Image (spheres, rainbow, N blue to C red):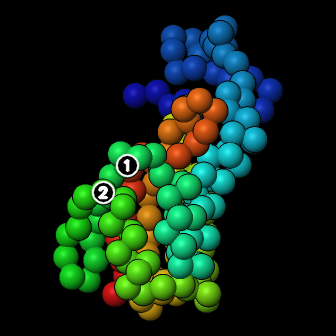
Amino acid sequence: MKLIQFKMEHAHCANEGNAPMANSQNLKTISTADHEAAKAALDGYIEGLETGSFTRIADSFWENATMTGVTPAGFVEGSWRELEGYVEQFGAAPEQISHVDVVSITPTSALIRIDIENLADGTDCTDFHTVVKKDGAWKVIAKVFHVHG
């Protein structure tokens, strides 16, 4: 087994003779603006949980988006619209703290991780949102989550 060695001045491939890669390119395919736009798709979700506004949460989701995860009560799956009942039951979370990361991104899809502390029901949560860009707008198509104790 040959190892791949990377150097700043040349990229070498683990092929016969370690010849430089003739077609190697160092291209940035996803703009910083797209990273920020994909993350911003979750602004409505985060702000809606913080303020207790299901209308604001709805701004982040495609109509047929799904939601699956684990809570202290067990496994949950269904429509993202079930968040409406959560907001009605628990209200706003003014002490909520959120951290958002783009885990992976393509020109039309991204996986966004959100760590949220101090939700309205007193729990913390880790969410993974698959967002899709359609007609220039990034929105959530699927949410997978784990509620921590």
In this rendering, does residue 117 appear at all? no
> Viewed as shown, does residue 64 lie left or right of 92?
left
- Quarter of the image with the C terminus in it: bottom left
Element assignment for label 1: strand
Quick one: label 2, few (<14), some, or many (20+) residues within 10 Å? some
Q: Are marks 1 and 2 in contact (CB under 8 Å)?
A: yes
Q: Which residue is nearer to you in this view: 23 or 145? A: 145
Residue 78: image location, x then y, percent: 25, 58
Q: Amino acid at mark 2?
A: Ser
Q: In the image, is residue 11 above or below residue 78?
A: above
Q: Residue extending furthest left? A: 74
Residue 99 lies in what quarter of the image?
A: bottom right
Residue 103: image location, x then y, percent: 54, 51
User: Residue sitting at 48 percent across and 85 percent down?
Assistant: 91
Q: Which residue is tagged 1?
A: 65
User: Residue sitting at 45 percent across and 82 percent down?
Assistant: 124
User: Residue sitting at 62 percent across and 46 percent down?
Assistant: 38
First in sequence: mark 1 vs mark 2: 1
Q: Amino acid at mark 1?
A: Ala
Q: CA distance from mark 1 to mark 2?
A: 6 Å
Q: In the image, is residue 87 above or below residue 106?
A: below
Q: Which residue is nearer to you in this view: 141 or 58? A: 58
Q: Which residue is tagged 2?
A: 79
Element assignment for label 2: strand
